[in-house]
Amino acid sequence: MSLLRQVEVGVANGRTTPAACRESGITEQTYYRCRKEYGGLQVDQAKRLKELGRENGKLKRLAAELSLDKQILQGMRKMYCFCTADLSICAISRVLPQISSSVHS
């Protein structure tokens, strides 16, 4: 945010955008990308936006891990579930607690 403001001050003082970007040590592409993303935001709003982005990333990783756990358990259920026509009891009911504890260990 401070670099964005620094470039904007340079432009307001009569410098061209490329010159103001060079003086700030960023490329024009970076400046325009940041301006597009953070242009009308206050500093606290920009910080909150970044914080929400990090939280969103953590939640996506967690969802992916849970999905993988679910796929593993479904595969194990298919492997260990030997139901017969006479008995409706699956071997999975005895094996699943052992598998779940070993998967999360």
Image: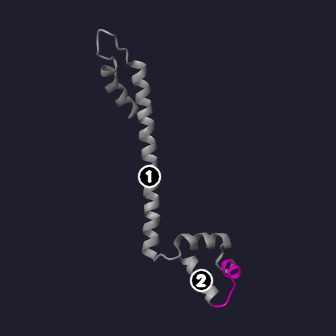
Q: Nearer the viewer, residue 76 or 83?
A: 83
Q: Which residue is found at the position 56% from the left and 81% from the top?
A: 5
Q: Is residue 30 left or right of residue 50?
A: right
Say if 28 sits above or below 74 in the image.
Answer: below
Q: Position of residue 36 (x, y in %)?
A: 57, 71
Asked if residue 27 shows in the view, the reply is no
Q: Which stretch appears magenta?
A: 13-21
- Badge number at residue 22: none
Q: Residues within 10 Å of mark 2 (few under 14, many from 20)?
A: some
Q: Position of residue 55 (x, y in %)?
A: 42, 57
Asked if residue 82 shows in the view, the reply is yes
Q: Residues within 10 Å of mark 1 (few under 14, many from 20)?
A: few
Say if 66 sits above or below 53 in the image.
Answer: above
Visual colour scheme: one colour
Q: Position of residue 27 (x, y in %)?
A: 68, 72
Instruction: Inspect the image, locate mark 2, and give the three-letter code of the amino acid beneath it.
Output: Glu
- Nearest to N terminus: mark 1 or mark 2: 2
Q: Which residue is mark 2?
A: 8
Q: Is residue 77 left or right of residue 31?
A: left
Q: Which residue is mark 1?
A: 58
Say if 21 sits above or below 79 in the image.
Answer: below
What is the secondary structure assignment of the residue under circle 2?
Answer: helix
18 in magenta: yes
Instruction: Inspect the image, locate mark 1, and give the three-letter code of the amino acid beneath it.
Output: Lys
Q: Which residue is found at the position 69% from the left and 84% from the top?
A: 16
